Amino acid sequence: MRLVVFICGLLFSGSFIIISCVNNRTNANIENNKVGKLTESRLVGTYRGKLPCTDCDAISTSLTLATDKAYTLEYIYLGKSNQTFSKTGKWELRDGELNLEGLDYKYKVEPEQLRQLDLSGKEIKGELAERYVLRFAN
């Protein structure tokens, strides 16, 4: 009789542990999706910076992300021209990276800023690396 009670106790405990693990994974996935949505909504706004330029002083850049997933990118080549260039399109957040429709490069999403990645999608290294950042303006 003690053996039957002991085996039932082991089966009950094992079942409880398995159910708890499955439930935690489900909750973790739900939480990750919520964080993704919150991050996406927190991206909305304007980001500004002066990016490096090979044949001018800097590229004054302003990127505005709207709630309807539209973006406007405006830039001026400082020291070369006063003309403002602009691009528009849709934006998408995927795996912590901001993709802008019609552009070859992406941005890594960081707290209060966007870091431009190189054309292969890797973080830019070297002495100019910190200049490839657009900071949240509003």
Image: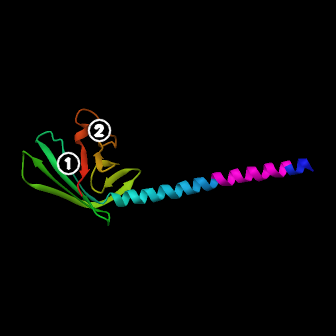
Q: Which mark is residue 32?
A: none
Q: Which residue is mark 1?
A: 49
Residue 82 position, x and y percent, is: 6, 52
Point out the stretch of residues depicted in magenta: 6-21
Alpha carbons under labels 2 and 1: distance apart: 16 Å
Q: Is residue 72 left or right of residue 57?
A: right
Residue found at x 81% / y 51%: 9
Q: Is residue 104 left or right of residue 78?
A: right
Q: Are there few (<14), some (14-19), or many (20+) residues within 10 Å of tag 1? A: many
Q: Which badge, 2 or 1, comes first in the chain's sequence?
A: 1
The verdict on residue 8 being magenta is: yes
Q: Which residue is mark 2?
A: 124
Task: Look at the numbered disc 2 and give the secondary structure of its residue.
Answer: loop
Residue furthest top as drawn = 126
Task: Look at the numbered disc 1 and give the secondary structure of its residue.
Answer: strand
Residue 134 position, x and y percent, is: 24, 49
Residue found at x 69% / y 51%: 18
Residue 105 seen in render: no
Amino acid type, callout 1: Gly
Residue 71 position, x and y percent, is: 26, 60
